[in-house]
Image (tube, rainbow, N blue to C red):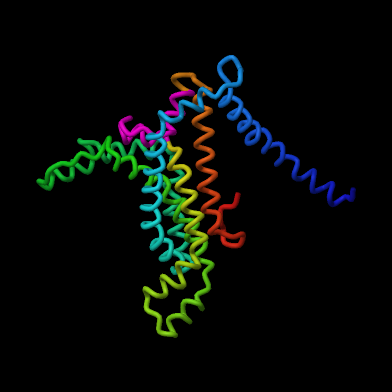
Amino acid sequence: MNKDSLMKKIISAPYYLWAAMFIIVPLILVVYYAFTDVNGNFTLDYIKTLGSYRYIFLRSIWYGFLATVISLVIAYPLAYIMAKSSASVQRMMVMIVMLPMWMNFLIRTYSWMTILEDTGIINSMLSALGLPQVHIINTAGAVILGMVYNYLPYMILPLYTVMSKMNNSLIEAAEDLGASKMTVLSKVILPLSLPGVASGFTMVFVPSVSTFYISKKLGGGTFAMIGDVIEMQFQTSYNYNLGATLSLVLMILIILSMAIMNRFTDDDDGGVLI
């Protein structure tokens, strides 16, 4: 063994130790609890109970998908504007996008409760204008709004990264050949930005599907997500076996979605690889 290979192994040893302690070992524990009972005996009883949670899984996937699509619609033009701005404007806009992420996740969610409540800021403004109040809090729309707000930066930043590396000469060539703006968007910009779309889609969809605090506070517990059920099993019911089973299924769904999105990315454009 030469010195270079020995040095590489020494340098990478902390990473392998970290991966073993905080990735591999927790996954092994999840699988173990999912297929055992409280006495440690092998069982499939918890797997058989998953059918009763199918509507919660479907709701989580549907809400996560809606939040991701809405985030994409908002983030795509914003990321393009950022990428085409001057360097100083780009730095300022990136900071504005990242600024809410510096605040605690719980505080951001509580802030939206203050805004959306029946006596909150929105309804207070409507009352001041003489308009009828609207009930927003404790609805599905409030849950999706909370997910979009909290995870929107994860859609903007990958799109901005890819678009900032886009070759402008290709766009100019298409315009010189008589392509309309819509044609340039659909035939040039969109295909070149697909890795960023796939990466952002994954980075928003994964936490949206597994979220639990947003749905509890903005949905009032009425629109429970699978993350809420898993948290309840570990924090309230102390049913670690069922919680691990639900976590295992959720993990498989997330891995499948990442694998699908990974087909639209490559190593050079910031895609999410697994």
Q: Quarter-wise, where is residue 30 in the image?
A: top right
Which residue is found at the position 84% from the left and 50% from the top?
5
User: Where in the figure is residue 272, as x and y percent of width and height?
Assistant: 56, 53
Closer to us: 88 or 15: 15
Which residue is found at the position 30% from the left and 40% from the top?
140
Residue extending furthest toward the right: 1
Above or below, 173 against 9 in this view is below
Which residue is found at the position 48% from the left and 44% from the top?
206
Residue extending furthest toward the left: 130
User: Where in the figure is residue 28, as x and y percent of width and height?
Assistant: 63, 30
Q: Which residues are magenta?
A: 212-234
In the picture, measured across the screen, residue 170 lies left or right of residue 67, that is right
Q: Main secondary structure of the magenta part?
A: helix
User: Where in the figure is residue 126, as x and y percent of width and height?
Assistant: 16, 45
In the picture, measured across the screen, residue 231 lies left or right of residue 55, that is right
Q: How many marks?
A: 0
Residue extending furthest toward the bottom: 177
In the picture, measured across the screen, residue 1 lies left or right of residue 243, that is right
Q: Quarter-wise, where is residue 114 in the image?
A: top left
Q: Residue 70: say if magenta.
A: no
User: Where in the figure is residue 139, as x and y percent of width and height?
Assistant: 27, 38
Q: Residue 233: say if magenta.
A: yes
